[in-house]
Image: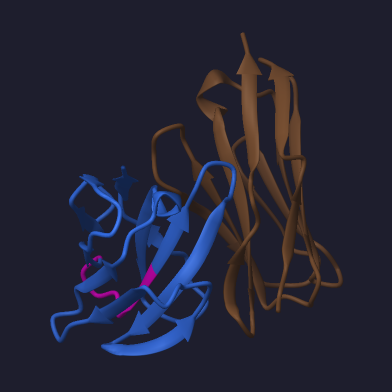
Chain colours: A brown, B blue
Amino acid sequence: GQQVMQIPQYQHVQEGEDFTTYCNSSTTLSNIQWYKQRPGGHPVFLIQLVKSGEVKKQKRLTFQFGEAKKNSSLHITATQTTDVGTYFCAGGGADGLTFGKGTHLIIQP
Amino acid sequence: DSGVTQTPKHLITATGQRVTLRCSPRSGDLSVYWYQQSLDQGLQFLIQYYNGEERAKGNILERFSAQQFPDLHSELNLSSLELGDSALYFCASSVGGPSGYTFGSGTRLTVV
């Protein structure tokens, strides 16, 4: 079945540094979604990308969908302590939505 | 408040027991999904219902079952519980089709 791999598993950054998490699928995706889960919280939907090569921005967050629709990335510019949490990608395909294992973002003040 | 309501928030029970987790989806959402989240295991998809009917099955054990009722709320039944079933169980809902999921706050199940 469909597999979605996400790297890195953990990322430590100093506050103010940039952060990127990458998502790769074994199959072509119909769409990719990104979620954020704060410590002790539940996943919260951030965005959905549908088109090949699509780039979307939300303030300091930039989301990209690869040309082949098999990979995606989330980039955060100048991290803040409020960015702490786990970022999940989720790929849409024939098997429905498949979540990656997430990247835990740890920020040191 | 996400609009998806899960009860109870916490549950502690003994091995071999049976529990029922409840989920009320966001108003207007027809699809309900159940996920299990263990430490460092990400979100494991269990099962999906759409407007009362089972739509997709993931890694759901035979000891687990679910249903969606006419009012669209859903229940996840976990039986013959084992220590390894201790986890966070999330319910999510969506309007259906390729749209974002709205997650509930989860039920933390501890099997002792």
Percent of width and height locating residue A39: 46, 32
Q: Quadrant of the C terminus of chain B?
A: top left
Q: Residue furthest right?
A: A68
Instruction: Using the image as rendered, state which of residue B111 and residue A88 is in the foreground.
Output: B111
Q: Is residue A43 left or right of residue B77?
A: right
Q: Is residue A109 left or right of residue A40?
A: right
Task: Write down the quadrant of residue B28 in the picture.
Answer: bottom left
Above or below: residue A33 compared with residue A29: above
Above or below: residue B67 compared with residue A14: below
Q: Main secondary structure of the magenta part?
A: loop
Percent of width and height locating residue A98: 61, 68
Identify the residue shown where x is 52% and y is 44%.
Answer: A36
Give the total number of marks visible in the rendering: 0
Q: Is residue B31 magenta?
A: yes
Instruction: Using the image as rendered, state which of residue B41 and residue A89 is in the foreground.
Output: B41
Above or below: residue A10 compared with residue B88: above
Instruction: Using the image as rendered, state which of residue B39 and residue A106 is in the foreground.
Output: B39
Q: Which residues are magenta?
A: B26-33
Percent of width and height locating residue B24: 20, 66
Q: Residue furthest front?
A: B16
Task: Write down the quadrant of residue B69 in the picture.
Answer: bottom left
Q: Is residue B86 left or right of residue B4?
A: right
Identify the residue shown where x is 53% and y is 42%.
Answer: B39
Task: Write down the quadrant of residue B46 in the picture.
Answer: bottom left
